[in-house]
Amino acid sequence: MKSRNVSRNNKTLLYITLIRPVLTYGAETWVLYKQDEHRLSIFERKILQRIYGPVISGGRWRIRTKQELYQLCGENEIVKFCKLSRLRWAGHVIRQDDDLSRRVLLSEPGGKCPRGRPRLRWEDGVKEDAAKLGCRNWTVVTLNRKGWS
């Protein structure tokens, strides 16, 4: 990414087509904690800062801001990318007729809960992401494939 022989467009294309998919492989099934989101964002900004470098502003060199980097890249932030892929996968699972993954998602485990704060679950993240998009009953909305994607 530091090489001057490779153009910025090619470096951006390499990031979008090679590095990002490897980094987010299986992101549809991740439970994203704040620490994970923070680490992913830091990594992405480091890569984008390497690609686009500093800029001269007012006669002095400065590091580009986060908004400038994403505007130059033209892609969503990596955390947003992961959350959108998780919502896409959730819609796919709900639309399955009689699949094991759908039965596991819709099942209600019995038993007594342990003391303390419960651990985050994948479904909690999906519900939170859907609520941020203004969707109240996401399981019903996902049945309309064109409206969900």
Image: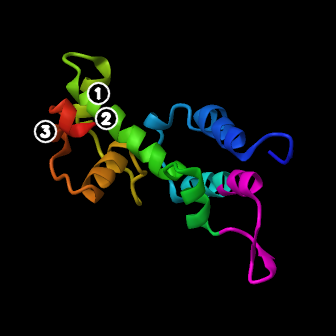
- 38 to 124, vertically: above or below: below
Mark 2 crowd level (few <14, some 14–19, many ≥20, 10 Å Cα)? many
The residue under label 3 is which amino acid type? Val
Q: Nearer the viewer, residue 12 or 82?
A: 12
| Residue 44 percent coordinates (x, y) | 64, 52
The residue under label 2 is which amino acid type? Ala
- 72 to 97, vertically: above or below: below
Residue stretch in magenta: 45-64
| Residue 56 percent coordinates (x, y) | 77, 73
Asked whether, in this view, residue 137 is left or right of residue 59, the answer is left
Counting residues from the start of the chain, the first of labels 3 and 2 encountered is 2
Q: Residue 139 occupies which quadrant of the picture?
A: top left
The residue under label 1 is which amino acid type? Val
| Residue 123 percent coordinates (x, y) | 32, 43
Q: Which residue is mark 2?
A: 90
- Marks 3 and 2, how far apart at CA: 12 Å
Q: Nearer the viewer, residue 57 or 69?
A: 57
Label number found at residue 148: none
- 95 to 74, vertically: above or below: above
Q: Which residue is mark 1?
A: 93
Report helix, strand or loop for mark 1: helix
